[in-house]
Image (tube, rainbow, N blue to C red):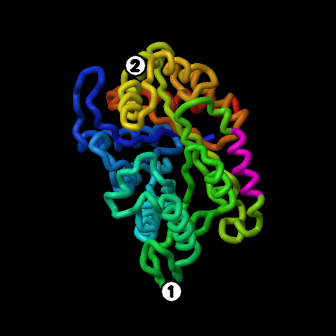
């Protein structure tokens, strides 16, 4: 079981002190967190993408590159790359370059994005929401097959025997292929698509009961098996289904203190999203409910969080769990402590339980 964290580089005013951290400082904070995650043995760090004033990261590949240059073992990936409003050729070149110099430690998580601000920014129409993603993920995967590509579609100029370089790092068991995964919030069609394409899948679980995703995970695995030989011809011979789960979490030395510390930052973030999208306003009752056993928030001391990861694994059989632990600017000291506890206390407990 891989463990890690992901971030969008929140730069909201602190709901506790009112302090505002500059985007530059937040980027330095993010890199410090990833260096620590590498040191304590975590396997994954994800860098999100938003084009809004309340987040510092609009170019995840730039931050990923900086993080890879300062670490030695951890996989660093996008969480997510909003592929619908990107040029797959340029994205492929960027990630293949990072894959080369990091010796296979980069991951491209391709999604539509949870916000839509990138569509007008880059001249894409929301009327083409599904068609954009379908075309661009297909092109991205075709680029990964060979260094020369012939292709045509609706949303970018055609390619005629185009040479696309560089090629990714030649990794044992994978060959010269990028690690490309599909992100979803729980859409059955996305689960089936990822399986049929033979790609890893990452489920963003931000509410409800994570165990309820079991039918989607089963659909993904059945679709993967359905793809059969057609998938294995494109991928490495030992390729297998891979399921990641992403959601909110926070680890502290004491369970009650961890929930108390995280609450105002969670509340500020949820209030802002609820106001923008017309959702019902969050409150302490919903927070405590979601933080309890079986809920979507993994908040508590190391033993409690480890126990809940293991319990979810018994239902989903997932391969990775990553936590968003810095909502609305959780202070750097507390963020670093949560990462340290995840690597030094939670990870060994989970590993021992799953042996």
Report the residue at 29% width, 20% height from top.
16
Q: Residues within 10 Å of mark 2 (few under 14, many from 20)?
A: some
State the residue in front, 230 or 5: 230
Q: Is residue 336 visible?
A: no
Report the residue at 22% width, 39% height from top.
22
Report the residue at 73% width, 69% height from top.
230
Q: Is residue 21 above or below residue 287?
A: below
- Cα–Cα gap, marks 1 and 2: 56 Å
State the residue in front, 206 or 180: 206
Disc 2 is placed on an element classified as helix
Report the residue at 54% width, 41% height from top.
204
Disc 1 is placed on an element classified as strand
State the residue in front, 10 or 38: 10
Q: Is residue 31 visible?
A: yes
Whole-percent x and y of residue 270? Answer: 41, 30
Which residue is denoted by mark 1 in the rendering? 161
Which residue ends up furthest to the top in the rendered image? Answer: 256
* The N terminus: image quadrant: top right
Which residue ends up furthest to the bottom in the rendered image? Answer: 161
Chain part drawn in magenta = 214-225
Whole-percent x and y of residue 262? Answer: 41, 22
Identify the mark at residue 261; answer none if there is no mark. Answer: 2
């Amino acid at each position: 079981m891989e463990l890690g964290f992901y971030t969008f580089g929140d730069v909201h005013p602190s709901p506790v002190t009112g302090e505002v951290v500059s985007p530059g400082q937040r980027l330095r904070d993010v890199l410090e967190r990833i260096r620590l995650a590498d040191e304590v043995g975590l396997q994954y760090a994800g860098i999100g993408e938003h084009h809004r004033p309340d987040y510092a990261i609009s170019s995840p590949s730039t931050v990923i590159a900086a993080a890879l240059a300062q670490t030695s073992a951890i996989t660093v990936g996008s969480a997510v790359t909003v592929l619908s409003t990107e040029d797959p050729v340029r994205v492929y070149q960027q990630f293949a370059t990072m894959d080369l110099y990091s010796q296979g430690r980069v991951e491209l998580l391709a999604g539509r994005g949870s916000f839509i601000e990138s569509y007008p920014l880059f001249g894409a129409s929301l009327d083409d929401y599904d068609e954009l993603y379908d075309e661009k993920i297909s092109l991205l995967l075709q680029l990964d097959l060979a260094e020369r590509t012939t292709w045509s579609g609706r949303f970018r100029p055609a390619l005629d025997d185009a040479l696309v370089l560089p090629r990714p790092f030649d990794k044992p068991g994978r060959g010269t292929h990028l690690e490309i995964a599909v992100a979803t919030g729980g859409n059955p069609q996305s689960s089936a698509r990822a399986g049929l394409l033979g790609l890893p899948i990452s489920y963003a679980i931000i509410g409800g009961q994570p165990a309820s995703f079991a039918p989607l995970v089963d659909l993904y695995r059945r679709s993967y098996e359905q793809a059969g030989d057609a998938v294995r011809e494109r991928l490495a011979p030992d390729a297998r289904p891979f399921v990641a789960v992403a959601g909110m979490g926070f680890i502290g030395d004491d369970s009650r203190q961890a929930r108390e510390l995280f609450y105002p930052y969670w509340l500020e973030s949820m209030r802002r999203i609820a106001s923008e999208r017309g959702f019902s306003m969050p409150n302490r009752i919903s927070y405590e409910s979601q933080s309890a056993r079986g809920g979507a928030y993994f908040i508590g001391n190391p033993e409690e969080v480890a126990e809940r990861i293991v319990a979810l694994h018994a239902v989903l059989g997932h391969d990775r769990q990553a936590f968003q632990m810095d909502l609305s600017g959780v202070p750097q000291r507390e963020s670093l402590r949560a990462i340290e506890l995840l690597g030094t206390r939670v990870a060994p407990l989970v590993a021992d339980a799953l042996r």
